[in-house]
Image: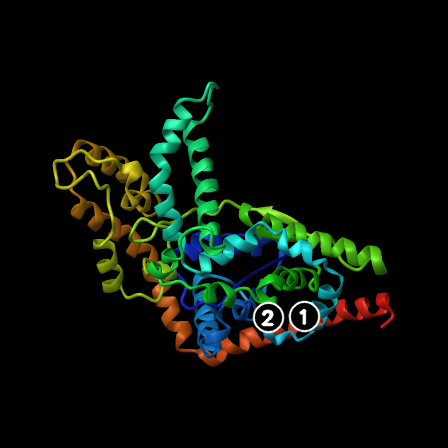
């Protein structure tokens, strides 16, 4: 089975990238024909004002991919912009894709809000209405099977409505100035390229005739749109494209140092390029259970970001003991962090060494991706020849 996936070049990779994406890619390359793409054209949809950074970011991604275990002997590793045939198919697909399909994409506005860095605004709305929502649910004349799930669904829906009202001018405009966000920022993301990026994403998949794409649940609408575009082309001109299926993968949400999702934009990430000392400093700054203020206070491991790392990087027997000692108050947060760092560093050290080796052989690294890009291009050329033939161009 041919599998394709890609990643925008945003710079050095962090632990979240590995556990959310790369680890799964490494498993897939063992049993399938895998194509992995550095999606530099996609980076332009949101970073067109800082295009000069993309080249350096590509290099950092290449280094991390190889250091983490992606194998050019098992996978086609390539750079999107080296396959010019994608642009021609993008134009063709743009001509046959109804605009409404793009506007109805449920992730379109959500992604725009994330790029505008207004996640904190959404969180503040949630905090302001949480007690009201709880009070409302308590008065419901119905049996609620999962109170917490329903509460979160309501909070998400209501807070999203408030955010949209800010940009629509329904709420006071002072909110935008306090957040240092303007309507121009909103318009800067409201481009043709941003609206149409799912079409280019469909090209990424279909031009290589990928049969499956590993995605999280939030990406399912993009795969369905790709299938719709494939069906529309096949119905109009004749069969060329397979309808790819989604390989639903669980993507563990690795927390950053501040307890939020690990992200470069939050400045809370642990990078594979970080030195041992840098990682240790970040670990010691980790947020912990806010109710455990000192050693002796009983802790709540299930709410502590540090303990979530123990479950990944510390051996199971020791993790059980850490959990018990935290709950009893016998283990303080400082010592808990030190123990976590030991396991984390044992995981990072061999990757750090491999990364240094790869970084010292940049010519060989670039040759790997040039060769992979040429392989990808040959596949794309064959597909495009079929497209032209079916369309009688």
**Which residue position holds label 1?**
86
Q: Colour mode?
A: rainbow
Q: Give the spatial CA distance, label 2 vs label 1.
A: 8 Å
Residue 81 in the image: state x and y as whole percent. 60, 74
Q: Residue at x 18, y 39 (%)?
A: 292
Q: Quadrant of the C terminus?
A: bottom right
Is 370 drawn above or below residue 151 in the view shown?
A: below
As helix, strand or loop, the secondary structure at mark 1 comes to helix
Q: Tell which of 104 and 257 is nearer to you.
A: 104
Q: At 39% from the left edge and 23% from the top edge, which residue is drawn?
A: 138
Name the residue located 72 percent from the left edge and 57 percent from the top edge.
98
Q: How many marks?
A: 2
Residue 134's image quarter? top left
Q: Nearer the viewer, residue 299 or 135?
A: 135
The quadrant where residue 248 appears: top right
Q: Residue 204, position in %: x, y?
A: 64, 63
Earlier in the chain: of badge 2 and badge 1, it is 2
Q: Position of residue 183 (x, y in %)?
A: 46, 63
Against 324, residue 83 (above or below) is: below
111, 323: nearer the viewer: 111
Of all residues shown, which one is farthest toward the right? Answer: 392
Most distant residue in the bottom direction: 363
Q: Is residue 242 left or right of residue 392?
A: left
Label placed on residue 80: 2
Density class for disc 1 (Cα within 10 Å; few <14, some 14-19, many ≥20) is many
Q: Are marks 2 and 1 in contact (CB under 8 Å)?
A: yes
Image spot of residue 265 (x, y percent): 38, 61
Can residue 218 be seen from the camera position used here?
yes
Residue 2 visible (yes or no): no
Q: Residues within 10 Å of mark 2 (few under 14, many from 20)?
A: many
Q: Does 270 appear above or below 92?
A: above
Give the SS element for disc 2: helix
């Amino acid at each position: 089975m041919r599998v394709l996936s890609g990643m925008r070049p945003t710079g050095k990779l962090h632990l979240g990238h590995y556990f959310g994406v790369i680890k799964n890619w490494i498993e897939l390359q063992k049993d399938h024909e895998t194509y992995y793409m550095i999606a530099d054209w996609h980076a332009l949809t949101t970073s067109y004002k800082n295009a000069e950074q993309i080249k350096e970011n590509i290099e950092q991604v290449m280094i991390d991919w190889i250091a983490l275990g992606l194998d050019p002997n098992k996978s086609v590793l390539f750079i999107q912009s080296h396959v010019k045939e994608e642009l021609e198919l993008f134009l063709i697909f743009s001509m046959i894709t109804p605009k409404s399909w793009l506007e109805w994409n449920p992730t379109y506005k959500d992604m725009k809000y994330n790029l505008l860095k207004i996640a904190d605004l959404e969180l503040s709305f949630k905090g302001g209405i949480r007690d009201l929502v709880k009070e409302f649910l308590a008065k419901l004349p119905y049996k609620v099977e999962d109170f917490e799930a329903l509460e979160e669904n309501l909070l998400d829906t209501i807070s999203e409505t408030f955010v949209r009202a800010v940009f629509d001018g329904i709420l006071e405009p002072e909110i935008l100035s306090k957040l240092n966000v303007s309507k121009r920022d909103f318009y800067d993301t409201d481009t043709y390229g941003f609206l149409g990026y799912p079409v280019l994403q469909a090209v990424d998949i279909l031009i290589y005739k990928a049969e499956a794409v590993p995605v999280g649940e939030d990406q399912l609408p993009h795969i369905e749109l790709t299938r719709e575009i494939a069906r529309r082309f096949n119905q109009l001109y004749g069969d060329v494209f397979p309808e790819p299926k989604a390989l639903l993968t669980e993507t563990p949400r690795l927390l950053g140092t501040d307890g939020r999702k690990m992200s470069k934009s939050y400045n809370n990430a642990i990078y594979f390029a970080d030195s041992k000392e840098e990682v240790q400093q970040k670990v010691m700054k980790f947020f912990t259970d806010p109710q455990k203020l000192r050693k002796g206070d009983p802790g709540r491991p299930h709410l502590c970001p540090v303990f979530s790392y123990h479950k990944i990087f510390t051996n199971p027997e020791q993790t059980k003991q850490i959990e018990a000692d935290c709950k009893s108050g016998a283990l303080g947060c400082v010592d808990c962090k030190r123990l976590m760092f030991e396991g984390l560093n044992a995981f990072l050290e061999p990757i750090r060494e491999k990364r240094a080796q790869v970084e010292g052989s940049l010519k060989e690294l670039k040759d790997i991706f040039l060769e992979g890009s040429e392989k990808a291009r040959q596949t794309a050329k064959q597909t495009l020849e079929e497209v032209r033939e079916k369309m009688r161009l």
